[in-house]
Amino acid sequence: MALPTHILLTYGYVLLFAWVMVEQFGLPLPAVPVLLAAGALSAEHQISILIAFVVGLVAALIADSAWFLFGRRYGHHVLRLLCKLSLEPTICVRQTQDSFGRRGGVTLMIAKFVPGLATLAPPVAGENGMSFSAFLLFDGIGSALWVGGLLVAGRLFGDALKRDPSLLDWVGRFSGALLALGIVGFFLARVIRRQRFLKKLVDARLEPEELKRQLDAGEQVFIVDLRHPLELLPDPYTLPGALHLSPDALAARVHEIPRDREIVLYCTCPSEATAAKTAMMLHKLGIERVRPLRGGFDEWKRLGYPMDAVQPAMSGAQ
């Protein structure tokens, strides 16, 4: 805790306020070490634990209220932005909305303790129509528990240092390395989860033969052609009934995507790269039944399956 302690002694409550607010706005700058250090310093009366609590709580509420109002005003556009910034593909909007569906405002009380929920919960609450007064109540309780809990934990450690000062030597020797390892571990864990999700997505690819059987059987399938408009010039065809949209246009119309059927995405990229990335984006936005088409347009064409003729200029305008 030597590094956060030194910074806190230099910049005091201003740093505590800024650090907590920046983290709550979604930047990967963990505030936990700073709050723990502030609690530890309060044992020596170098920082007031009460003032530190108020400063941390106000910082969290300001950031959360801003996200709440953004979510109420701009809805899924804000959530799309947060999902693009998120390194966690399996949390994002879907799990946050599921949590609100099961727990309501209690989600805000526990969000600070669940990785991935702290930044997403306020805009989801705003988008779902929660009143601002109810939001402040639940979010205030959750923020108070989070800030207060960390300050108290730090204070207990500070009291232990007063009884056994030799603990400070150990902490000073290893705190910087532990902080760095914690930050690196934070990113590595999310990168690993991301890779696992991509592997799961690859395993879930839909074979062209299976899609052909579904279409022949009259099953309702939502097919999206993700190719660039220029790619349609030499091949002005799409799969039967496919909607031609760019990934960004598809995300902007996420509320029009049906949830009661499979969403099939295809492109002409090697290994269906565009389809896989778009599928991950849709999954983060709450669309679960998404499957890239193995081989994409080229494989469908090679197999000689039926296609619909399109006007490339019209397709590119969508």
Image (cartoon, rainbow, N blue to C red):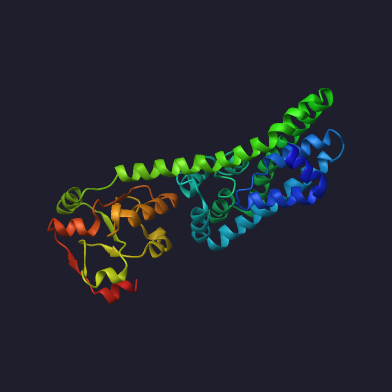
In the image, is 126 to the left or to the right of 84? right
The x and y percentages for residue 104 are 55, 43
The quadrant in which the C terminus is found is bottom left
Query: Quadrant location of residue 48?
Result: top right
User: Which residue is most to the bottom?
Assistant: 313
In the image, is 220 to the left or to the right of 101? left
The quadrant in which the N terminus is found is top right
The x and y percentages for residue 18 are 72, 52
User: What residue sits 54% from the left and 44% below the top?
Assistant: 116
Q: Name the one closer to the observer, 118 or 85.
A: 85
In the image, is 73 to the left or to the right of 40? left
The x and y percentages for residue 154 are 75, 33
The x and y percentages for residue 288 are 37, 47
Up-down: is 140 above or below 252? Answer: above
Q: Name the one closer to the observer, 36 or 152.
A: 36
User: Which residue is most to the front?
Assistant: 173
Up-down: is 262 above or below 164? Answer: below
Q: Name the one closer to the observer, 273 or 239.
A: 273
Up-down: is 310 above or below 121? Answer: below
User: What residue sits 40% from the left and 49% below the top?
Assistant: 283
User: What residue sits 19% from the left and 48% below the top?
Assistant: 210
The answer, for residue 206, to whether it is visible in the render is yes
User: Which residue is most to the top?
Assistant: 164
